[in-house]
Amino acid sequence: MDLFYAALLPVLTLAVLGLAFRAARAMRSRLDGVTGLKDRLKALPGIAATLLSPKGWFDILTLRRSLGGGPWRWMTAALIHAGFIGLLVVHAFGPWTADLFDLYYEATLDPFYFLRDLFGFMLCLGLLMVICRRLFMPRLRRITRPMDWALLIIVAGIGLSGVFWQAAKSVSPAAFERMTEEYFYGGEEEVAALKAVWTVDYDVVFPRRPDTSPETLEFGRELNADSCSSCHAPASSAFMSSAVAKVISPAAPALERIDAAAALGTLHGLFILAGILLLPIGKFAHVLTTPLNLLRRRGRSSSEAARERSSGEMEAARQEGLAACTHCGECSLRCSVAPAYDVLGIRPVLPSEKIGELGAYASGRLSGKRLDDFGSGSRICSQCGRCTDVCPSGIDLQDLWLSSLKRLKEEKLAGPQYYMPGKSPSQRMTALRGLAESRAERARAEKLVARKESYLGCVQCTTCTSVCTVVNASANPARELDFTPQQVMNLLRMGLVDHALGAGMTWNCVTCYKCQEHCPQGVPVADVLFELRNIANARLREGED
Amino acid sequence: MQFAWFPGCKIAYHQPQYGRDALDVCAALGLEPASMEFNCCGWPLRQESLRTSALAAARNFALANAAGLDIVTPCKCCYGNLKVMAHKLQTLPELRTTIDAHLQSEGLSLAEIPRVLHLLTVMDQNLDKLRELAGNGLGGSPVAASYGCHALRPSEATDFDDPLAPTVFERVLKALGAEPVPWQLRVECCGHFMRDRNDAMADSIGLSKLRDAAGAGAETVATACTYCQMQFEGLTGDEELPAAETVASVALRAMRRKS
Amino acid sequence: MIDISCDVMVIGAGHAGMAAALFAAQKGLSVAQAGTTGGIDFGSGFIDVLGVHPTAKLLEHDDPWSAMDSLRREIPDHPYTRLKTDEIKESLREFIAFLDAQGLPYGGDGQSNLRLPTPAGTVKRTCRAPQTMIPGADALASKAPCLAVAFDGLKGFSGHQLTETLGRHWPALKSATIRFPGLDGELFPEHMALALSDAKRREALAEAVRPHLGDAQYVAFPAMLGILDCTKITTHLSQLLGATVFEIPTLPPPIMGTRLRAAFDRGLPALGVRTLSQKTVRGTQKHPSGGFTFTVGGARDEYRVSARSAILATGRFFGKGLRQEMHGIRETVFDIPVAQPSGPDEWYSQEFFDPKGHPADRSGVRFDSSFRPLGPDGQVYHQNLRAAGAILCGHDWIREKCGTGLAVATAWKAVQSLTEQLEGGN
């Protein structure tokens, strides 16, 4: 135990330094790409002010936002939070809590003994539900990362090591010997009676089971009441560790030989130290960042209502939101465009995956395929706002998506639909050059582009071009669109798919379907243009693999 | 059969008023479409891949199936994609097989493709009630009905109205007591699709529609699509342009004025 | 499937189909009409009654009616033999009145043919023409100073072609090729027409033309001066230029196709016609009681139409009323036997421009004096069926220059006959 307390201060210091480093990085990171450091610093007082928000505190204490995921979700969150906070209050900071209520503190004394197990039970139950959720919901299972398991392992580790440590201590006769030597004054007969009580009421497993006849027990209980119970509540109070103790009692001698209790104690300490050390990293910090974000949101529901007063405060709010993500995946379970993830396998389509990449994008750490996928995920988002509604951490996801997409579009990173219209044909063809026919093209159920039959009816009557909204809106179709619709059909009839992919017409098509509707020969012009864009998207996606 | 309400992704954040107004209109007509959770109709996903768009639509169909409901939507892009994908699912067996497999992995199945109706069709089926509720609240004010594109075309899939000479929107407006004006560009695209891809073109297409409506004497351009409404609301020209208003808002305005 | 019932199902949305739907609706019959883009979308808009007879001699006529009397004598199978001159004139009068009401007025006195310039620089005789084209006849006849304006990028209209060919007889015809204000590259009449709905654009156009005007009393433009607002636009340009502005048709895609479609799309539903645009009849069922059930749709069956009667106005090859197959020509909706050359070897002459024309171009369904199609045994195919327009056999409308007139007049007669029959309780 002394080692634990000795390590505690340095570990805490490291954690605080880590948090400070993370906060500093957040200050430098700009999501909108525009707001400068001065404006960011001006927002600092605002952060302090949010700490006073009553609605924010309400959200923190009642976990109101977890209801977005349904009653079971709220229950899970409530169990874990109540359990962990309860453990902090009655166990980790037990002595201070006892002082507050003018109570005498012993870990093994009620109410602390019982409450510790109660909160431990709640924590473990909640964790079990969380683990089951991650294991048995296929989409969650696929997106769960090592860090998610790490946090679960550490918290579960803290809880379970504590339970097992107590159980090991309970069953250990050595602890009994030590305690009676120091604190009990009585002869052999008294000790024997005490042993009986401690076997029955306190789960101790003696090498030889003492006589537990009713008279002995009665006598022993009287002695126990005088000498021990002022510091020891019976095992029934610690219902969970008691149950575990009973389960491990057959192995008690072996555990005694290897001094399992001490080992478990060390394990318990290590788990706690690990948890503190890792606090600044990723989602471990949510214990601090999520409440901060809930305060920032001040109970406001819609994204529109969540606007801040200045761009500096807006950026601060965004950074707080980014840091508050617990990767619980609730947003991704409800995402409207999840079918795109199911088919295309692009992870940042899902909000819980996109938000992580967003932080990296804002710090300029994204490139290559990761950047492309982030761009894809951002543009595919349909901005339905459901993720924002259900986020238990109250992150204003909708604002994050809108502001980052705006920036992606400006930087021409939002995907071919956005950057191709502005390019020249040779630039477009260069972007697509050398990309082999993709698997997606080969697997496409409706193949129009590559089949000559699609164009057999085309007599180049130019009706499609005549009715085309886009040609009509072009002051110079040859320059702006390169080819008109009937010319694109002609290119494809000649098998010149690459040229068609490079044509401005393909990328400026407004999808009004007038061409296909008016064609007297049944050429599916609009569907062909759609397929061309699909082909380009598929080649760009697969070309990066 | 009862209907499920399919607002589409854009209404919640971008056009919440249209969503509320459309439901109020349904309520006034004595209809209460059921509220349930759908995913994206698949319209914006059509650029990415056919399969993605088809799966999105099919998943919605499966969800509606499971609830025993048909679908009604106020957005023409949603309507168009649901109908086009329904058509493709019925005419491309290979696509249907692939989609069925995807649905199955989620424990969903597509027994049959539900009916999909657009809000205008529902209003058209209740013209007498509309007339009764609206009376002369709009006083014959000149309104240009903007059909847009995706409900009308491709007509082999959409089952909405005659693609060249549609009449449903004007019938509804007349029942509401407005005077629909004939105008040249009424079945043209609003141009929203090119927003942020080619803004000059999006502006040009949208503004030419509003100007044409103005030239035809319209005070209002009525829309029945979330995207059309977003597009027109976002346009400003050098001259005075008619205001864009959703058909639901027009209907409620008429009903309020009457009483 | 949606169920529709009607008195008349009009199959076809070309000149004959549109005219039939119009006439039937005006007679108070309930009409459903199905049809797709076809020949009408590629025409000049001229209403030809009869321009050339006999075609083998390439003899052109200024008096279509006396030419028609000769034709009736010399081609006894021709549809015109079943029509009286008064009937033809009445049909055209009603047809034109409808178009006028939609903003598409037609000129010509209907007695003699107009002589109008074509984009090839030839002169075409036609009976009625869009009012915007009419001044061309006066300009041509008087050989007045005239400026023909062509545009860079509008491929279907060449100023040089006009002055080369027409200029031989009309020295005062000059041409200028200018840039269309605000549009470059490849131009299409429909986009130019839409652009001219803006008064400022018209002013810019006049500005661009003025330097070339000289002493011109007439200014000829390719047909692209607006859609249903063409009168307003032509009048305004005439004012701006101080000369009489008129249109000359362009090569396809022609604006008149768009104009006629717009007029019908606006006017027919207003008359209560149930239009099923871009849909075709996919299946037919004849009922012993006299009516029909048609399944109509695009790629699948979408409508079931129960009709007391029907008018087949599906056009010829481009309209897909007739289809050329390996062993013969078939009628695509009812499979009515087609009067045709004995075999594919007989369809075409060796010479593309053979003045006698090509035998395949005279194929079509046989008909009686009420324009009821005849079946395999020469009997009426169905009491309640009529046929109108290019689907009828016995004419070569392209060479005879009688397309629209024949379509409208036969449609009119078909509707007359049907109305009498339906009102007579059949």
Image (cartoon, rainbow, N blue to C red):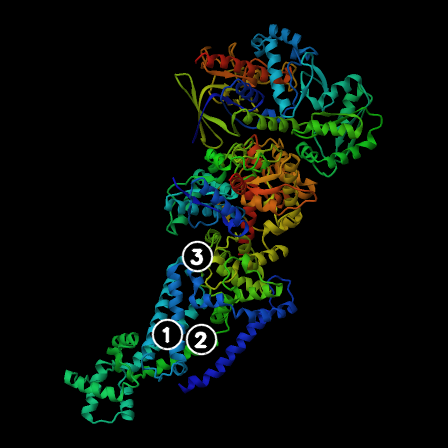
Closer to us: A433 or A115: A115
Closer to us: C144 or B232: B232
Q: Is residue A323 above or below residue C262?
A: below
What residue is drawn where x is 66% and y is 22%?
C105
Q: CA distance from mark 3 to mark 1?
A: 28 Å
Chain label for disc 3: A
Mark found first going from the N terminus, 2 or 1: 1
What residue is drawn where x is 53% and y is 17%?
C27
Left or right of residue C126, residue A417 in this image? left
Identify the secondary structure beneath mark 1.
helix
What residue is drawn where x is 24% and y is 78%?
A250
> Which residue position is annotated with label 3?
A333
- Report if residue B78 is visible in the image: yes
**Where residue A483 sits: x, y (%)?**
65, 40
Q: Amino acid at mark 1?
A: Gly
Q: Point out which mark residue A275 bears.
A: 2
> Which residue position is annotated with label 1?
A159
Quadrant hosting residue B96: top left
Q: Amino acid at mark 2?
A: Gly
Q: How many marks overall?
A: 3
Quadrant hosting residue C137: top right
Q: Residue furthest top?
A: C73
**Where residue A17 sits: x, y (%)?**
54, 78
Chain label for disc 2: A
What residue is drawn where x is 68% and y is 13%?
C58
